[in-house]
Amino acid sequence: MEKKFLFFDIDDTLTTGGMGSFIPDSARNTLKALKKNGHVVAIATGRPYAMSKDVAKDLEIDSFICNGGNTVVYEGEKIYNEPLDQAHVKELLRECIAFGFPYCISQADDFFFLTKDMKALPKLDNDFLSQFIQEADFDPEHLTQVKRLMIYVNKEEQKKLTSFPDLVPQRYDDAYVMIEPDDKFKGIKKMMEILKEPIEDVVVFGDGENDIKMFQQAPISIAVGNAIDELKALASYVTDRSDEDGIQKACLHFGWISPEDISK
């Protein structure tokens, strides 16, 4: 059987129901069967490194793409890691300051954010996120390692911000927009390049907007049943949700595993 490199998004792909949801046994058993058959199984997520490694460890996976494609871990070792384009970050922060939009920055491979003035931040309905914000003294003009930004601006006011050349806004809440990497396939290409493996052997699984660039570039792309319509239109194959055994069904369909592999 020809070896494949299979990259799985986590939230709403391996899981169903968002961050913190469980991974069904059928998906876990499928990942184990894929590895036993000689395939390489990896994660491809927008999550920062600190919020990816525990999931990878739980699944007994030691290779993954995280930070939206800007960090690559292979066999437990970071082999590629870069921040956002810092020139574009500074342009955007200048605009935030000019318009009076409060913002936070993250400089590490985790989910902790720094802000210059906690009092300026609107109260977040998302109590989970608010736990990760700390006040600190920093000069926006001398930042060198910003990994993601959170800007408190509604959809209408966001139109005032024009410094988005290579920075992609992701809106998870009406109160703020997150600026973070979103080309997970860039990380996949980097891993395959370092391993000297053909890109033709790549398979990606996903569900959402930040999987679109993967699906536009990957040789084989598989959308789970709860995926957005735009992603399904790009997919090589559409399967069921993970909690409806969708991961397993797709791998059986392509012959990467057999019914005997998952019945052992």
Image (spheres, helix red, strand yellow):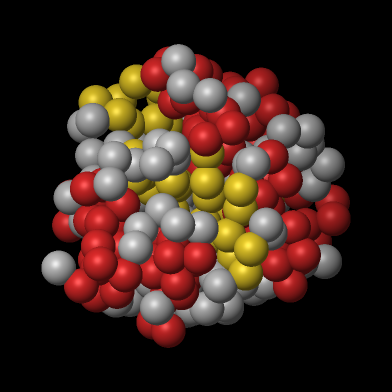
Q: Is residue 162 left or right of residue 243?
A: right
Seen in the picture, residue 175 relative to 116 is either above or below; the reply is: below
From the top left corner, tell me how far across and down residue 155 is, in percent. Answer: 76, 66
Seen in the picture, residue 209 relative to 35 is either above or below; the reply is: below
From the top left corner, tell me how far across and down residue 204 is, in percent. Answer: 53, 50
Q: Residue at x 70, y 67 (%)?
A: 232
Q: Residue at x 68, y 59 (%)?
A: 235
Seen in the picture, residue 166 relative to 228 is either above or below; the reply is: above
Q: Is residue 258 left or right of residue 59?
A: right
Query: Can residue 148 be seen by looking at this rendering?
Result: no
Q: Nearer the viewer, residue 247 or 13?
A: 247
Q: Residue at x 52, y 39 (%)?
A: 202
Query: Can residue 248 be seen by looking at this rendering?
Result: yes
Q: Residue 231 sits in which quadrant?
A: bottom right
Quarter holding the N terminus is: top left
Quarter holding the C terminus is: bottom left
Seen in the picture, residue 217 relative to 210 is either above or below; the reply is: above
* Residue at the far bottom in the pictured view: 244
Numbered marks: total: 0
Q: Is residue 206 left or right of residue 3?
A: right
Q: Nearer the viewer, residue 5 or 215?
A: 5
Q: Is residue 82 left or right of residue 175?
A: left
Q: Nearer the viewer, residue 37 or 21?
A: 37
Q: Nearer the viewer, residue 102 or 68?
A: 68
From the top left corner, tell me how far across and down residue 257 is, in percent. Answer: 35, 58
From the top left corner, tell me how far across and down residue 5 is, in percent. Answer: 43, 39
